[in-house]
Amino acid sequence: MDRSYTILLVPDRDAKVRKIRVEHRMLVRAAVASSLVLIGFVSMAAHYFSVIGRVSENGVLRAENLELQNWKHEAEHKFAHLDDELDRVKRLNSNLRHITSLGEADRKLGTTPSEPAMLPEGAQPAGINPPPSGIGGPYTGALKAGDEGRLHIPELDGESEPDLLGKLDELGKKVKAQEQEARALQSYFQDQSALLAAAPSIWPLRGWITSEFSVRNDPYTGEKTMHEGMDIAAPVGTAVRAPADGTVVFNGSEGGYGHVLVIDHGYGIKTRYGHLARIDVKLGDKVKRGQFVAAVGNTGRSTGPHVHYEVRVNGVADNPRKFLLEE
């Protein structure tokens, strides 16, 4: 037989006493239900605080992730900047070393001005092809280097901080080596100021490079010939400046090259300018680097206004880009 409990409710004064009869099994069920509710509440509270903790932790992780992404982008930018700077220094060192080789004994260079170099017999005069529509643009003077010797920037995705620091340290060592080489060249040039002044190290004008120093198809004959200079296209009348100190040794007409100017810079180095509209210096004039000496034209055998620019060392044509130090 089930047990039961009676609860007496005794009100104040003369009110009737009330009895409530509760069976034992109902109390047990109520106690179990209350326990389950309490356990559920505690579990929910624990889960709630756990979720709150994870949300807070996720916020911190998101902030850290954003900071790492910003750091990664900044590191990539710095890598690219350092790589460009190192590439520029390498080009500069290469050109400086080419210039310093002019003073080597086996080049047998002299400083006495001589007659302007003439084209070899049978050589075709150099003209230009007009720049194709939509290709090229005003030349900025930046030289394009090949991939050889250039640092390859590592992909930063997945790189740990020690790895990146190691790569930065390696990059720093290479930059330092280039800097030491540049300082050695600077020290050399301090003792070779005359040679440096004679080197045609700046662009004679700004324009479109329509033909490089290379073997090409002659624009008139279609035959492959050596183009012994660089064609720089620009509007007629554009000023042409001397790329180095020197003396005017030729001023006149020369076959397919039209109006030609030749400047002797000493050390066997001469620069030559063809297809000019006019020449602003006289035979025997001393010129300084950067001085305006002529104007772009379309004289001689030419397909458009431009200057045919040559650098000759002891009468042998050399690539003008090898002497350019100006970016």
Image (cartoon, grey):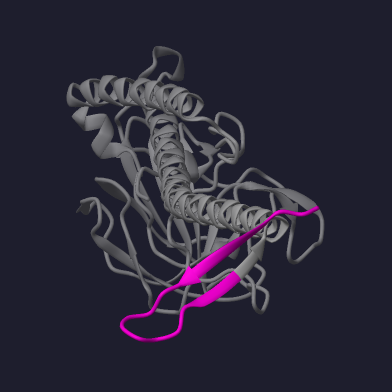
Left or right? Give the position of 178 relative to 167: left
325 is within the stretch colored magenta: no
Q: What residue occupies the far front of the structure in this picture?
A: 14
Left or right? Give the position of 139 relative to 200: right
Observer able to see residue 109: no
Residue 15 or 279: which is nearer the viewer?
A: 15
Residue 315: percent from left, percent from top: 49, 36
Q: What residue occupies the far bottom of the structure in this picture?
A: 15
The residue positioned 77% from the left and 54% from the top of the image is 2
Image height of 267 relative to 142, above or below: above
The residue positioned 61% from the left and 31% from the top of the image is 148
Observer able to see residue 4: yes
Left or right? Give the position of 211 relative to 219: left
The residue positioned 37% from the left and 31% from the top of the image is 96
Q: What is the total number of numbered labels drawn onto the structure image? A: 0
- Provide the residue span drawn in magenta: 1-20
Task: Indicate the quadrant where residue 13 lies.
Answer: bottom left
Residue 192: percent from left, percent from top: 22, 25
Residue 7: percent from left, percent from top: 53, 66
Q: What residue occupies the far top of the structure in this picture?
A: 105
Residue 147 or 260: which is nearer the viewer?
A: 147
Residue 237 or 31: which is nearer the viewer?
A: 31
16 is within the stretch colored magenta: yes
